Amino acid sequence: MYYFYTSVKFYIIPNPFNCYMKRIFTFCLLTLIAFSCGEKKETKKAGGGGQNNGPLKVEALIIKPSSLLNEIDIAGNILANEMTEIRPEISGRITQINFKEGTTVAKNTILVKLFDGDLQAQLKKLKVQLQIAEKTEERQRELLKINGISQQDYDLSLLQVNNIKADIELIQVSITKTEILAPYAGRIGLRNVSLGAYINPSNILTTLSQVDKKKISFSIPEKYSAEIHPGMGIQFKIEGSDKDYHANILASETVIESNTRNLKILATINESDSKLVPGSFAKVNLVLGTNKNAILVPSQAIIPSARSKQVILYRDGSPEFVDVKLGVRNAETVEITNGINQGDTLITTGLLFIRKDLKLKLTKIQ
């Protein structure tokens, strides 16, 4: 604006440019308000149209019987048929090591020999004492026949002989404990001691494994425990090999583990393969049978809740929420063991928008 000073008053004359900018700003503001109000009306109209335009459109599936191979894949562990930690029964110094790591040994092979010099000396001493005691007992027996001594004196000499014999047996047992034998034929593991070392029963000298036969152990969920029986065949694979190995169930544990609710199973492996290293991981495939009348539904049709699982059935244009029990599950389908029957119409789409009082319209039925 321009200001003119006169002798009497100030006159304010509007600036044409500022008036033009005010008009443009006012027009833009009114246009924005009108657009916002129109958008709200359209949104409200669109939101209310879902309720006024009729039922919710959904797709459904007619429940039909299907053939289901009841199988589970679980993790297993390869075991040697027998595996023993070799420990000494007594303390002592190692004088001989008669095995090589990784070799196969026969049953009763002397693996480690401990020092037994003191025991051998005691054994010799007792043998000399036994000879003297036996001669004394023999003379007194002859004297007893002619009543040269009393029965009590003879009994004391006989007792002395028997005591020395018992001491000799104890020493021989102690000497036997200095020889650590292989309890069965098998393969020796790594050696943990050296010649001359002093060891005690807490030391593990090496391990012995019976690897010509192997086992596999695994655990199954509690609900499958009734399906397991001795002699039942299983298949498994190991890492780094595509070969299918076979085994037969040997036995199961007598109790179910309280922490995991699993039952431990042990099976004997039929093949003899060097790739089956004890301790290695195995993927077990356990076939529990075939159900030709199984009810299978898509996994996305299951509605999880805090206490149960539900599905929605189509009943005369209305939804019906039904609690179900699940069985075998795979990547795409899940078995329903209780809750729905063959011929029921299962809703498979729009599950998040369905309420009990909502009307439904089927657009596609499989």
Image (cartoon, rainbow, N blue to C red):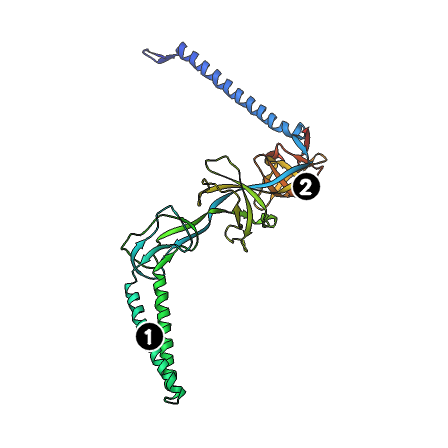
Residue 55: x and y in percent read 67, 30
Could you tell me which residue is drawn at 32 percent across and 71 percent down? Answer: 127
Q: Residue at x 41, y 9 (%)?
A: 16
Q: Is residue 287 visible?
A: yes
Q: Nearer the viewer, residue 144 or 191?
A: 144
Res 355 visible: no
Kindly identify the residue that appears in the image at 50 percent across and 19 percent down: 32
Task: Answer above or below: position of 119 versus 275.
Answer: below
Q: In which quadrant is the C terminus drawn?
A: top right
Secondary structure type for disc 1: helix
Pointer 1 residue: 131
Res 136 → quadrant: bottom left
Neighbours of disc 1 within 10 Å: few (<14), some (14-19), many (20+): few
- Alpha carbon of mark 1 to alpha carbon of mark 2: how far? 92 Å
Q: Mark 2: which amino acid?
A: Ile
Residue type, numbered disc 1: Gln
Q: Residues within 10 Å of mark 2 (few under 14, many from 20)?
A: some
The reply, left or right, for residue 81 in relation to residue 323 is left
The residue nearer to you, when weighing 106 against 270, is 106
Rendered image: mark on residue 176: none
Q: Which residue is denoted by mark 2 in the rendering?
A: 340
Q: In the picture provided, is 82 more to the left or to the right than 149?
A: right
Upstream in sequence: badge 1 or badge 2: 1
| Picture coordinates of residue 123, whole percent (x, y) | 31, 68
Viewer-nearest residue: 1 or 132 = 132
